Amino acid sequence: SDTGGSVRQPTALCGIVGLKPSYGRVSRYGLVAFASSLDQIGPLGRTVADVAVLLTAIAGHDPRDSTSMHLPVPDYLSLLRGGNGQATVLPLRGVRLGVPREYFIEGMQPEVEAAVRQAIAVMRDLGAEVAEVSLPHTDYALPVYYLIAPAEASANLARYDGVRYGLRVQGEDMWDNYRATRGAGFGAEVKRRIMLGTYALSAGYYDAYYLKAQKVRTLIRADFDEAFKRVDVIVCPTSPTTAFRIGEKTDDPLQMYLSDVFTLSCNLAGLPGISLPCGFDSNGLPIGLQLLGPAFQEEAILRVAYAYEQATDWHKAKPPL
């Protein structure tokens, strides 16, 4: 599931392909809800064709999920194979790609930027028209996400109380039972987010934090709407760095949250996004390329991803370890 990048980030750091569909494209029935307005199920695979097949299988309306949309589901793999331009026509001719200036930031790993820039050059050679676009409220995505997501988590995870739902750890009385259950069932990061969310929703703070965050979320979505009037697909990095060491950021949650800076906006706006490999750094660690498209236009990002994949060998390459 991808709430703020948890499909795209792992695939970028592991050198495979992962797609986060538009909100409402895939049923969330059976998913343990974290942030209900952000969560979306997405496929992971070795190639773009893999995730196209999986998306066709899992997409569509589900009467058990009121947020799933009544929209037809195309055969995504057939669309790819029918429009890959293997003959004389460049596969991306006529496709307008937008490069957001706010997604190439200070502190970004230079090898990541170089690999993504090179990928953009490849797509230009495949016939794509490349233009710079602006998503001016990008800087607010991180604080907005970390208000909305924990607030919704606080409400969703309240059901795990050891009385009505989920794990139960027996205590001496009801309150001890409640404390023991939640203490054993939730890790430190989950507890941190519940506390943040409960604070943001508490009396006297709801308007100042949660409600204001929802208003800025609308502005972030409007940025994308404006950009997609000029371009068909937005291209950018998936992660500002390659994979970090296990436990490296455990003691610094803010640094860990900053790793999601390029993926959060997609969830806040409800848009589809895909990550695919576009190179390795000097340590042999994979670098991810992210493509974002308009809502329910998964075929647009799949087409660009497939054309790039067919023109390169990063999905076949073994890391130079």
Image: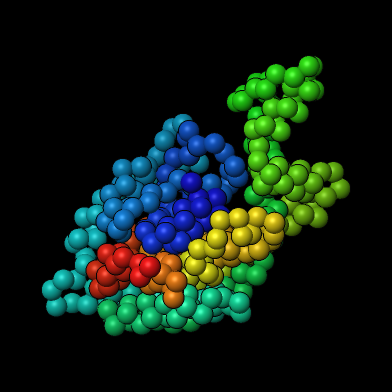
Residue at far left of view = 87
Res 305 seen here: yes
- The x and y percentages for residue 56 are 30, 47
Residue at far right of view = 204
Residue at position x 31%, y 65% from top?
A: 318
Q: Quadrant of the C terminus?
A: bottom left
Q: Quadrant of residue 277?
A: bottom left
Comparing 78 with 246, the one in front is 246
- The x and y percentages for residue 34 are 59, 42
- The x and y percentages for residue 28 are 48, 39
Res 215 seen here: no
Q: Quadrant of residue 170?
A: top right
- The x and y percentages for residue 133 are 51, 78
Numbered label tally: 0
Task: Please give left or right for residue 74 compared with residue 158 in the image.
Answer: left
Task: Please give left or right for residue 251 compared with residue 50 in the image.
Answer: right
Task: Please give left or right for residue 233 compared with residue 52 in the image.
Answer: right
Residue at position x 29%, y 83% from top?
A: 125
Residue at position x 70%, y 56% from top?
A: 251
Comparing 171 with 32, the one in front is 171
Above or below, 89 against 5 in this view is below
Rendering colour mode? rainbow
Residue at position x 38%, y 81% from top?
A: 118
Residue at far top of view = 172
